[in-house]
Image (spheres, rainbow, N blue to C red):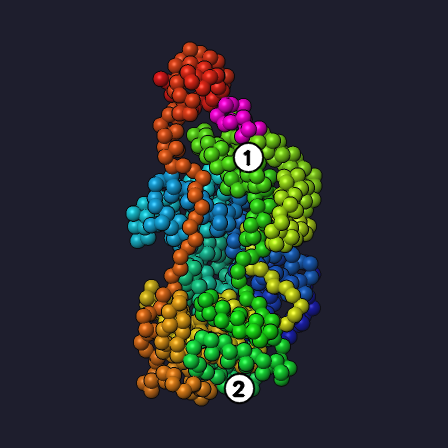
Amino acid sequence: MTALQSPPGYLTGLNPAQRRAVETLDGPVLVLSGAGTGKTRVLTTRLAHLVASRQAWPSQVLAVTFTNKAAREMRHRVGQLIGAMAEDFWLGTFHAIAARMLRRHAELVGLKSNFTILDADDQLRLLKQILQAEGIDDKRWPARQLLAAIERWKDRAITPTQAASDGAAQLAGGKLAGLYAQYQQRLITLNACDFGDLLCHLIQIFQTHSDVLASWQERFKYIMVDEYQDTNVAQYLWLRLLAQSRRNLCVVGDEDQSIYGWRGAEIGNILKFEQDFPGAEIIRLEQNYRSTGNILAAASHLIDHNRERLGKTLWTAAEAGDRVRLIGVWDGEEEARRIGEEIEALQRHGASLDTMAVLVRAGFQTREFEERFITLGLPYRVIGGPRFYERQEIRDALAYLRLVRQPDDDLAFERIINTPKRGFGDTSLRALTIAARGLGLSLTAAAARLIGTDELKAAARKTLAAFLEDLARWRAMADGLPPDELAETLLDECGYTGMLQADKAPEAPGRLENLKELVRALEEFETLEAFLDHVALVTERAEDGETAQVTVMTLHAAKGLEFDTVFLPGWEEGLFPSQRSMDETGLKGLEEERRLAYVGLTRARIRAIITHAGNRRIHGQWQSALPSRFLEELPADHVEREAIAGLNQFSQSGGGGGGWTGGWTSGWSAPRPRAPIIDARATRIETEHRPSPAVSVGTRVFHQKFGYGLVRAVEGDKLEVAFDQAGVKKVMAGFVSVA
């Protein structure tokens, strides 16, 4: 390894605290990085310094972050410092790194190395099947709600056995722990896992196979973690197991920006770091390089009201700048009109729309801004909505590719067996599913058995046989063709491309373009497996377009971004802070809401404008609003208040207090799920006649579909039976009983 020149140039320009964070390599280190204090630069420079100072090879360093975007940026920056060696770091998201590790030890948890990673849609479909089989009313106990509870268990590394004593186990009439166990067993049968399993399986392996844990501890001399305040319990346990031997763990985070408690993040992980790793070095990055003095002072004073803090005092060498503006308006429509006027005024003075953002607390707030911006002719983009890989045609194409790669993927099989239409409808699929479960086989394997029997109608058997032939051909092609050529050929041969070409609907051309884009995406990958893993792990979508646009997004989505001008609408009691959040988690919820407000303010570089309405239409109902308590927590010296006549004024005692008339409801009605493909009653009846009898030629048997008959021939697990009413049929031995 060739060391960089000393003194290393990459340390130039770091402030004293940043340099200390880069050069403190040994032992546990907690870098408390306030908003805009150069966290990414510290992380990437520290990675480069580990290699340049000969402390470790890149392959001996594990660096974990939360988003693919952050991982790409870090690798790019490190590459600028140390060149091609940056490719050898174990650098990626928690899920990507865990998937890479788990594939090496999959057999220890009952999986094969080519296991499928299910996305949220497939997880939901799988759980619905289990609920249907158990006779659980999906209207009373929505599958989405139950799946969320299971995911929270996995966030805390709680196994099905441990879940029985958890409060959430009372869901589904006290059956949720059992459903969780069934769900896990079905995943193993499918040779699949969900995102939570990636870490939970590894934790189980590390805790039960000390040799495996020791090998990974030996491999990684240094471990670094970005956004540590957002880790959940499972991520914490996984990291602690890996780091407990060498203790060279450096975590970077900001407890004041912990805003994901609703999805499992545990702020306690960062608050108790010193307890978990005694003797840890604590380094505070407090010089802010983003915001002006007034914005920074307002945000800092606001967050000081939180109790769950390690504490830091942010400061900036920049000028004070404009004070934070607080604007009161009559209602939401007036709020959108006023913000539109502010944007146009900034634009007239030369500001680009790309430098402005409207950050809302709740998704419903965007509608009025969209309508207003359309009226004004202001280009805008709403961050969120359906992502590329979640579109129907893309999901269908991916199901084909998944089944080519992994024949036991029943969920992929179900999705595309009759897409495009092949004459293999729900009835045939139900019969195939029952047979597969009875035989303990995947749908693909069961189909190969049933095409030689009379269990299915002749047309359905013919369709299955042709489909299996196609799968075998595509699977053989996969060994010799690049992934993009395979996908293009497959989509043509299966008829999907032709189906869209024949579709006269207005959106059909766009769907075809999406498939073309999918093929182009595959060009960047050497193997189909690498591409499918990438798709499963992608968490964000890139926005394109050359026209300058105002960004409209939620506060949660804005974390990590920055804009010259930030508009913060809807600062009213019940909306922000969210009444639902406070009702569910009390003071903890209020403090997370305050951290969210802090995040919103610190996205602004030059100006921050907060608005609040005296009236707001929520789910069709007009409600009066009190200004958010957060407004009274802002320091008077750093804010400029502007209220509309007739609005409720702030109380002099501080704090908005109270709530909205009628309260704040954030519930929603989920769309009715499509009918499950598995008939629970048929499964139960079929199971009653499933025991494999000791039959021979001449045995009188009963078959659920064909009735009574006499065995004429026996060939392995297949029987030829002369049925009294249905005539001579070939059936599986496991689906008859001795009469």
Residue 266 appearing in the image: no
Q: Position of residue 616 (x, y in %)?
A: 40, 74
Query: Which of 406/709 is in front?
Result: 709
Nearer to us of marks 1 and 2 is 1
Residue found at x 37% / y 18%? 738
**Mark linked to residue 423:** 1
215 in relation to 328, above or below: above
User: What is the distance, in whole Å, between disc 1 and disc 2 at their CAs?
Assistant: 67 Å
Q: Secondary structure at mark 2?
A: loop
Quarter of the image for residue 506 reads: bottom right
Residue found at x 50% / y 17%? 715
Q: Position of residue 28 (x, y in %)?
A: 48, 64
Residue 456 among those drawn in magenta: yes
Residue found at x 60% / y 43%? 401
Q: Secondary structure at mark 1?
A: loop
* Residue with the mark numbered 2: 322
Q: Residue furthest front?
A: 504
- Sequence-first disc among 1 and 2: 2
Query: Which of 563/668 is in front?
Result: 668
Q: Position of residue 591 (x, y in %)?
A: 38, 71
274 in relation to 319, above or below: above
Specify the amino acid type for callout 1: Gly
Magenta stretch?
Answer: 450-462
Is 219 placed left or right of 137 in the picture?
right
